[in-house]
């Protein structure tokens, strides 16, 4: 067994200098008073130790979210707006019943639109669009 150590404590010394240097060095080694960058590892964190209030604004970025990590339950109602949808993101098969699609004779999708208007409005068209169905009323 090693020789016992007697710790000298000098209450008149400045804070941080009241113990002998070798004791301060040992304390700093086993119980550092400051967290060094990179010293907190996943193994040192208790499960569920990092909670939402502990996360700073912008702490979780897109690159940190797993592929398929956002599920329907995580999306607030009304959060997905037209502006947030990419072009061609919502296709007729995803819309369900009630969405009409148009095909040519070979079965290829074609672009078609429908417009409701009066016969007078239709007569005033200079060049009706060939890909538009006009639903006329008197």
Image (cartoon, rainbow, N blue to C red):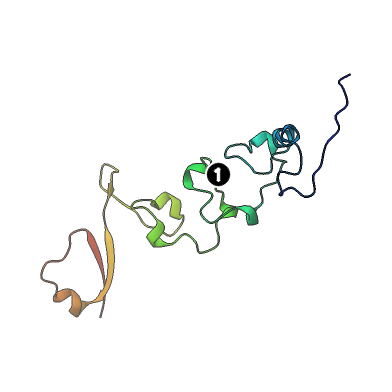
Residue 127 vertical placement versus 104 (above, below): below
Residue 16 vertical placement versus 27 (above, below): below
Q: Nearer the viewer, residue 115 or 51?
A: 51
Farthest residue, direction front: 12
CA neighbours of label 1 inside 10 A, class few (<14), some (14 to 19), many (20+): few
Name the quarter where the C terminus is drawn. bottom left
Q: Quadrant of residue 20?
A: top right
Left or right placement of residue 138 versus residue 53 in this view: left
Could you say where residue 86 lies in the image, as x and y percent from the top left? 36, 52
Residue at the (26%, 54%) spot, across then down: 111
Could you say where residue 137 lies in the image, as x and y percent from the top left? 27, 77
Residue at the (11%, 67%) spot, across then down: 127
Q: Which residue is mark 1?
A: 69
Residue at the (53%, 56%) spot, across then down: 57
Left or right placement of residue 23 versus residue 94 in this view: right
Left or right placement of residue 42 versus residue 118 in this view: right
Q: Quadrant of residue 3?
A: top right
Q: Nearer the viewer, residue 123 or 85?
A: 85
Q: Secondary structure at mark 1?
A: loop
Could you say where residue 34 lies in the image, as x and y percent from the top left? 65, 44
């Amino acid at each position: 067994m090693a020789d016992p150590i007697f710790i000298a404590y000098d209450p008149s010394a400045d804070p941080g200098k009241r113990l002998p240097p070798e004791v301060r060095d040992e304390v700093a080694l086993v119980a550092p008073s400051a967290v060094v960058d990179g010293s907190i590892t996943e193994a040192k964190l208790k499960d569920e130790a990092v909670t939402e209030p502990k996360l700073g604004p912008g702490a979780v970025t897109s690159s940190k979210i797993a592929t398929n990590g956002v599920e329907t339950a995580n999306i607030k109602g009304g959060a997905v707006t037209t502006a947030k949808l990419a072009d061609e993101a919502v296709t007729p098969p995803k819309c369900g019943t009630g969405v009409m699609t148009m095909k040519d004779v070979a079965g290829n999708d074609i672009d078609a639109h429908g417009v409701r208007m009066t016969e007078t409005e239709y007569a005033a068209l200079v060049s009706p669009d060939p890909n538009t169905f006009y639903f006329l009323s008197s």
